[in-house]
Image: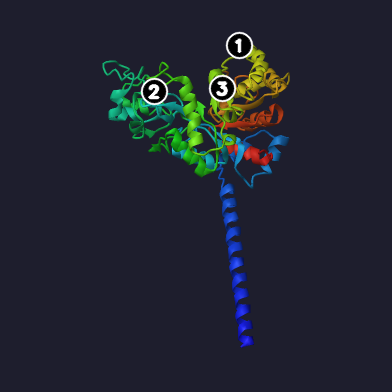
Amino acid sequence: MNLFKALLTIAGVMTALSTLAASSNMKDDGHKNRWRSEQNVQLGPRPFFLVEDMEKSELKSTLQQCSEGPFYKTDFSIGHRGAALQFPEHTQQSYEAAARMGAGIVECDVTFTKDKELVCRHSQCDLETTTNILETNLARKCSVQPDLTSDTPYINVKCCTSDITLVEFKTLKGKMDAGNRNAKTLEEFLNATLGFRTDLYSAAGTVLSHAESIELFKTLGVKMTPELKAPSVVMPFDGFTQQAYAQKMINEYKLAGVKAKNVYPQSFSLEDISYWITNEPAFGQQAVFLEDLNVPADLPTAIARLPLLAAEGIKIVAPPMWVLVTLDVNNKIVPSEYAIAAKAAGLDIITWTLERSGLLKNISGNSFYYQSVTDAIKTDGDTMVMLDVLAQDVGVLGIFSDWPATVTYYANCMNLN
């Protein structure tokens, strides 16, 4: 009997140990699964193509040595409208592609509908070029409808999110942002995608409300950078003030349980930034002031204003890439006066937008993003040279890109977070 009890005791101990081991394995597997999810970054061939297209240099050799990875998500890589180089911007598919390419932060540009619901669009009035609205009955609701009596019926067409309700907006399909204003037919107007992009993934882009984008981003495990777009309608809009608009955007993150540290609200409006700093300081402390700088003549005023921005509590500025770089006497890309002044003022910097200029080998003086360094750009591989200067010499926190894989590759190779 004592032997029988002893055997039962041993059996019980073995069962407990087995259960404990199984539990431990489950925890390990769960950890591994989460790790795999974190590491499930797929860059595709483009970053490797760009590295091989570089002229011989120490930087090229360094980047070549990283070709086998590992590749992982990084906040340095910011999905500009998702992955807008090849996917319809601000669609579910574009956002998912950006996350798959390792973007640690993804952008929803925020505007509002007729019933004052927030949606993801780059502009309040771009539906004619970014969706299929002109192919639907909702075209009758556009602010400016096609003039079918004209030889160029689409030259002034304008369709706004504020023309339709959220329910109506959700019936639309996203497409590549393009429209031939001189077209004579609707088909000609719609089939205008730039040659360096593609319509391959644009058959049925899923448009999203702002709240839906938040839930998607939570699922994808990425941080969020919403840009409060300037309204195209007169404010207040049916009683909806600019302040209520700015507050509603933040409220949707709070309602979704998103921590302020995972949100980088953006605006070109100093009033919006100041509102967040004053009324939503947890979100306002990492609000991003977007600099609307288009030509060199804009720079002196912008540079002089930088200490004032810092004094107002702004911590992050975001000018376009060209503003942060210039050429030295040897035609080498170096930090600009603006970049040096921003750092001297204690400001952090984010910049935009890589992979939005087409073939760099064909670049000319009218290229917006490279206008200050055009003479140094010879091949598409110089994308990586520009990226390196912005990261290492200027010291930006992150870079918006229409194809996040390129920035992810560089950031991973250089051990940037």
**SS for dot 1:** helix
How far is the residue under mark 3 from the one under mark 2? 35 Å
Specify the amino acid type for callout 1.
Ala
Assign the C terminus to one quadrant of the image. Answer: top right
- Image point (46%, 26%), residue name: 122
Instruction: State yes or no: discs 1 and 3 in contact (Cβ < 8 Å).
Output: no
Residue depicted at 54% across the width and 32% down the height: 225
Q: Which residue is mark 3?
A: 273
Residue ID for mark 2? 180
CB-based contact (under 8 Å), mark 3 and mark 2:
no
User: What mark, if any, has residue 297 been given in the picture?
Assistant: 1
Q: Earlier in the sequence, mark 3 or mark 2?
A: 2
Q: Callout 2: few (<14), some (14-19), or many (20+) C-alpha neighbours within 10 Å?
A: some
Q: Earlier in the sequence, mark 1 or mark 3?
A: 3
Residue type, numbered disc 2: Asn
Instruction: Please name the colour scheme applied to the rendered image.
Output: rainbow
Residue 232 position (above or below residue 54): above
Q: Which residue lies at the image location 63% right of the left edge and 74% below the top edge? A: 13
Asked if the residue under mark 1 is in contact with the one under mark 2, i.e. CB atoms within 8 Å, the reply is: no
* Residue type, numbered disc 3: Ile
Q: Secondary structure at mark 2?
A: loop
The one of 393 and 27 positioned closer to us in this rendering = 27
Please, is residue 68 above or below residue 296 in the view? below
* Label 1, label 3: how far apart the Cα atoms are: 24 Å
For discs 1 and 3, the disc positioned in front in the rendered view: 3
